[in-house]
Amino acid sequence: MKIGILGLGLIGGSLGFDLRSQGHYVLGVSRRESTCQKAMEIGSVDQASVDLSLLVSAELIFVCTPIGLIVPQIKELLPYLHKTTIITDVGSVKGPIVHSISPLWENFIGGHPMAGNTSMGIEAAQFNLFVNCPYVITPIDKTIKNNLTLLEEIVRSLGCNVYYCSPEQHDRAVSWISHLPVMVSAALIDACLNETDLEILELAQKLASSGFRDTSRVGGGNPELGVMMAQYNGQALINSLHKYRDHLDSFIKLIEEENWEVLGEKLLFNQHNRPRFL
Amino acid sequence: MKIGILGLGLIGGSLGFDLRSQGHYVLGVSRRESTCQKAMEIGSVDQASVDLSLLVSAELIFVCTPIGLIVPQIKELLPYLHKTTIITDVGSVKGPIVHSISPLWENFIGGHPMAGNTSMGIEAAQFNLFVNCPYVITPIDKTIKNNLTLLEEIVRSLGCNVYYCSPEQHDRAVSWISHLPVMVSAALIDACLNETDLEILELAQKLASSGFRDTSRVGGGNPELGVMMAQYNGQALINSLHKYRDHLDSFIKLIEEENWEVLGEKLLFNQHNRPRFL
């Protein structure tokens, strides 16, 4: 079929590669002419343009812009489309997007492939980025079943594991395992950097190894992405952060009370149960 | 020279491999006969025994037992030794150990190789474990200079980068970059596991990927080690935890106030400065 991709970054560009290799005809739109050129050169899309009207003939469109642009870009796009065109997005927050677009477009379905890495842009696009990744689809009551079936089929062809849930369930789940870790990790970097004894700070920087590196990784990532998570998933994130702080406080209390037995039990429980997330 | 190793786990066993390959004669002591046999079989030591008296002829002894056993085991060992024998340990906390042993043995030097991984036991021992790792040596006023020179020379021969600081400076620095991350990460696992809506919990477990995996890694590690950090480095750790909580609170406040500008600045500052720890 003819598939449109709006936003040719890591996700959009990689989708293009896989969809073309499945035999689909891929139309790509980017805000930058140079990105369009690059996407055609590397073979991620069949045709590309900075002009939204390129997508008029697409039967299905993946919106892969940064999260803050998804709703405004879809609104700009709608006037060009046939009523039957199916639109889906790949944003990492679902509630605000689904509830903004669904009233405007009955053939909209929210989605979120849990793929990607720290690389960005069309240059980072690759084949098979989505193999074995979770792909969450977030229908609502009025979502049209045939559209879901079609989207699921295409997503499965990328090698994804498909999960269904409501937009709100998605946002609460990712606030725990994706957005909360960013803030927890960011506060760690912040706290370490603010050691006022410079000899200690310098020594800490020399001695830091894999423990610090791993725990601080996501907190030292793309700042725009961190802000977007907070901005678009604020309520779920604030809820997770408050609960996290309660658990942190109970660790502090156990250490202050020198309650090694209960501290050991908690750490053992974590060690046993962490693999359920992996 | 003749070098003793008390405690034949990952660190002790790996030290044995490297020291033997440098031409030293290595005497190993473990509490378990089977570990002694294994250490000899794989060539990590020249001789091994469950009996501390094996170490009587060693000129330098590395104490590589779990941290809680370092002080009691050294106390048990002292009666067997010549007054000139140099003792050093590899414990990840230095203040309590150095201040317990120094009054009893003038030829004691505290040390801490920042090496290791999640594997444990003599089976995990390997050549070149210490290459490019920081090795902290923590002398005090009365530490004998010739002993320091000798220890530094041997530690450098393992490929380590040697740093000197006081035991207290060491403990404060590692509380930031090693012990705090464990508790921060443990509280994350704890908070996620305690989501009471089982549908959300199950979904979170299905969707968790590299962000959760990395941020939760050290909090899901060896529980005994986590307790030991808190037990032996309690004061520095409590101080770090309280400061961490203040920084966490300011992230929560920024998100609650929807202050995206300052949140973005903080995340950008982290992104720029995290590499100073790597």
Image (cartoon, coloured by chain):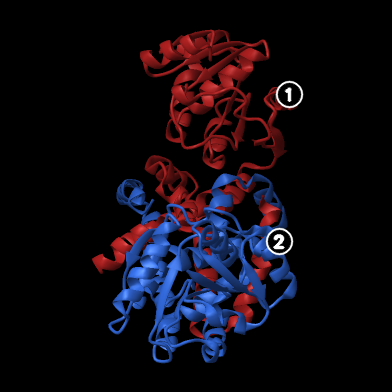
Chain colours: A blue, B red
Question: In which quadrant of the rendered image does the N terminus of chain B lie?
Answer: top right
How many marks the image carries: the answer is 2
- Seen from the viewer's position, the closer of residues B105 and B218 is B218
Residue beneath the point at 63% across and 30% down: B130
Image: A96 above or below B176: below
Chain for disc number 1: B
Amino acid of disc 2: Glu
Q: Find numbered disc 1 in the image and state the secondary structure of the residue it sits on.
A: helix
Residue identifier under label 1 = B153
* Residue at (47, 51) in percent of width and height: B182
Residue A63 position within the rendered picture, expressed as x and y whole percent measured from the top left: 52, 75
Q: Residues within 10 Å of mark 1 (few under 14, many from 20)?
A: few
Residue A41, numbered circle: 2
Q: Where is residue B238 shown, x and y percent of the image?
A: 48, 57
Residue B233's spot in the image, x, y percent? 50, 47
Q: Nearer the viewer, residue A126 or B9?
A: A126
Residue B112 picture quarter = top right
Task: Identify the image quadrant of residue A155.
Answer: bottom left
Relative vertical location of residue B238 with respect to residue A67 in this rendering, above or below: above
- Please state which of residues B121 and B26 is positioned toward the viewer in this rendering: B121
Label 2 packing within 10 angstroms: few (<14), some (14-19), many (20+): few
Q: Does residue B258 appear to the left or right of B192 in the view shown?
A: right
Horizontal placement of A255 versus A90: left or right? left
Position in image of residue B62 (x %, y %) = 56, 23
Residue B243 visible from this viewpoint? no
Q: Is B234 placed above or below A99 here?
A: above
